[in-house]
Image: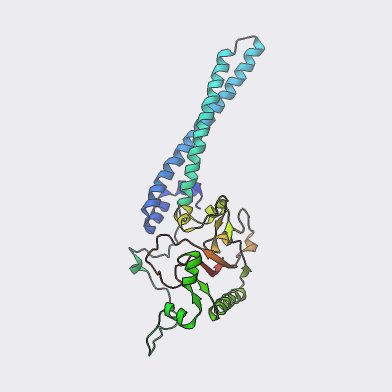
Amino acid sequence: MLDLRFVRENPQLVMENLRRRKDDRVIADFKRLLELDEEVRARKRRIQELRTERNRLSREVGRLKKSGGDPSEIIARVNVVNQEIRDIESETARIEAELRRLQMRIPNLLHESVPFGEDEEDNQVVREWGGRPTFDFDIKSHVDLLDLLDVADIPRAAKIAGARFYFLKNELVLLDLAMQQMALEMLIERGFVPVLPPFMMHREPYEGVTDLEDFENVMYKIEDEDLYLIATSEHPLAAMHMGEVFEPTDLPIRLAGLSTCFRKEAGTHGKDTKGIFRVHQFNKVEQFV
């Protein structure tokens, strides 16, 4: 999340970053954020003015009491000032909550090396590895291979859990575990610390690692609990050191997370509906620095 002072002092830089991301919704949110920020600051200035007036009036009340004067009119004004302060503070708290929500919608700045394009066709290939294999036989889809090798059972998973779930079995279970182990060992050799994170997170840390307004519709919420099933181990890894301050000598911190991930995959109806793509539950190794 961008610091509010930075946003306030660099509005054009932030706006240009949003334009490069081509997200009109966030651009509208950013304009509203700037308006609310100015309104909050104006209200706080007014509160400070009223507090100054209240202090002055309180001193005047004390002076009149000592001299035998009648402070009733001034006391009445103090009561009016106190009520105005309470009213402004209450409304300011509501506006600040909305300001905070909008602030969390503003993404980090893109690196200057990130290319700008109209769509995916403008993506730039940074590097390639290996070559595309060719075969002298008809290639089977992964759905056909799952059935042919008897390594997954999707119909029975659908019977007990619904669409986009699966049973892995036989050699594919061993392959899945072996690939996770291989990935972890490769990362450990590169200085990453292996981590098995919690599979659930509270809302507050989740708001700190992703834009819940965009992401919440694909996440599973635990009913009557302030807990969400994680959509990726990146999220608990990002929140792992929440609220901590690092010394330069502590960095970099390299984490290799292994977890099951849970996603509703809302809005993907008709996309990769066969087989074990775009499923609600899957295992993943995540590298996080």
Residue found 44% across the figure and 70% down from its top: 277
Q: Which quarter of the image is occupied by the C terminus?
A: bottom right
Q: Is residue 49 above or below residue 99?
A: above
Q: Between residues 131 and 252, which one lies in front from this camera angle?
A: 131
Residue found 39% across the figure and 84% down from its top: 139
Q: Can residue 49 be seen in this view?
A: no
Q: Can residue 156 be seen in this view?
A: yes
Q: How many marks?
A: 0
Q: Between residues 65 and 146, which one lies in front from this camera angle?
A: 146
The x, y position of residue 207, in whole percent, is 52, 52
Colour scheme in use: rainbow
Residue found 38% across the figure and 67% down from its top: 271
The x, y position of residue 64, in whole percent, is 62, 13
Residue found 39% across the figure and 88% down from its top: 135
| Residue 116, picture quadrant | bottom left
Q: Between residues 23 and 252, which one lies in front from this camera angle?
A: 23
The x, y position of residue 41, in whole percent, is 48, 37
Q: Between residues 187 and 246, which one lies in front from this camera angle?
A: 187
Q: Is residue 243 above or below residue 135?
A: above
